[in-house]
Image: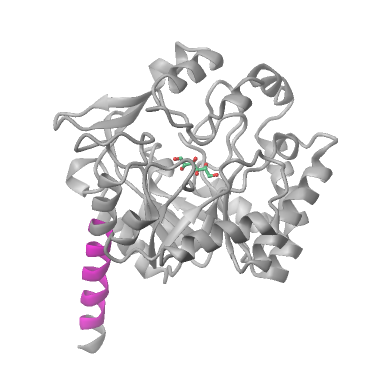
Amino acid sequence: MEMTLRWYGSKFDTVTLEQIRQIPGVKGVITTLYDTAPGEVWSREHIRAMKEEVEAAGLHISGIESVNVHDAIKTGSEERDMYIDNYIETLENLGKEDIHLVCYNFMPVFDWTRTELARRRPDGSTVLAYTQEAVDALNPEDMFDSIASDTNGTVMPGWEPERMAHIKELFEMYKEIDDEKLFENLKYFLERIMPVCNKYDIYMAIHPDDPAWSVFGLPRIIINKENILRMMHMVDDVHNGVTFCSGSYGTNLENDLPDMIRSLKGRIHFAHVRNLKFNSPTDFEEAAHLSSDGSFDMFEIMKALYDIGFDGPIRPDHGRMIWGEKAMPGYGLYDRALGAAYLNGLWEAIVKEEKKHEAE
Ligand code: DNO
């Protein structure tokens, strides 16, 4: 595996490339052209400029998170082919710039959903949190207002104001879309992009729905082992792969994370590893990466990744806000750096232990 950190670009991120470079073991960043809208073609010049900036700081681009998929593609509307053509052009330009990993999601309307961006934990840190009761009491527009008022002045991915201005229209577009239709539209999209992925060896890595169930009555399909295996089989190409995100699949306590990882051998191209603390099955908050701070066994997650021979980029995921840092909720420097160091430690121990066994 390769340890990386997500970075939103110098115009948007409070964390600098120079800081990222000093996190032990981190040489790669996962980044994006944050000021492009879903559906827009990414020009080669823009991609190259981003690459040069990262490389000038002594790092490299390990992958893109995300190239977002336009709602016309997700809903299968008349305009979808035009937007898929644009997506293909973006993939071509990324391939020509030697970028081979693209994370994306197929979530209707909202990307990830949380009901609090700064819940205080007993140690004084603040974290993102979710309660189903709070979602049930909100309508989707209020949800956006509550997120927007709590972002430390940053723009949260998936909650861009331009996008949320159209929320009613977006809901209208999904009126006829159920899980089956969404699967069909995903298949159509993947079948059209696979040739370009094969040509440039680009690994597509779908991000799970977060939380891993339906919110506001919208369909959600990338939520469990059964569905994700269905997706792998329906377009059976190694370039059709997965971002294994422990914090997203883990929202549903019925998901056995190490077992899911093992069942996806060869198809996990990117991993987000973080921990959650459950107060009840429908109330969880994000925790430090350390197993004992939350509800997951992080050793078992890393061990499963090791066992399947995972060699792609991995990144610590959302961190807590600690030590007075002001940053995009979940994406400060300090706690993610602690997370990277901890995950590197687990990995080193697993590798050395396994090598010792092999030598015996
Ligand atoms: C949130 C992230 C998501 C993720 C997208 C991938 O912090 O995990 O926004 O990047 O769903 O397309």
**Residue 345 within the segment the image draws in magenta:** yes
Which quadrant holds residue 201? bottom right
Q: Quadrant of the C terminus?
A: bottom left
Going 39% across and 48% down the picture, which residue do you hit?
246
**Residue 58 within the segment the image draws in magenta:** no
Taking the view exactly as shown, the residue that stands out farthest to the bottom is 359
Between 250 and 58, the residue placed more toward the observer is 58
- Specify whether residue 281 is in view: no
Taking the view exactly as shown, the residue that stands out farthest to the left is 123
Which quadrant holds residue 50? bottom right
Going 28% across and 61% down the picture, which residue do you hit?
22
Going 23% across and 57% down the picture, which residue do you hit?
342
Which quadrant holds residue 279? top left
Give the colour scheme of this rendering. Answer: one colour
Going 33% across and 42% down the picture, which residue do you hit?
332
Report how many numbered discs are placed on residues in the image: 0
Left or right, 46 with respect to 306, comes to: right
Between 64 and 249, the residue placed more toward the observer is 64
The location of residue 228, given as percent across then percent down, is 56, 50
The location of residue 60, given as percent across then percent down, is 47, 65
- Specify whether residue 215 is in view: yes
Determine whether 102 is above or below 139 in the image.
below
Determine whether 9 is above or below 21 in the image.
above
The location of residue 250, given as percent across then percent down, is 38, 42
Left or right, 317 with respect to 201, comes to: left
Between 80 and 268, the residue placed more toward the observer is 80
The location of residue 99, given as percent across then percent down, is 59, 65
Q: Quadrant of the N terminus?
A: bottom left
Between 342 and 222, the residue placed more toward the observer is 342
**Secondary structure that dominates the magenta span:** helix
Q: Which residues are magenta?
A: 342-356
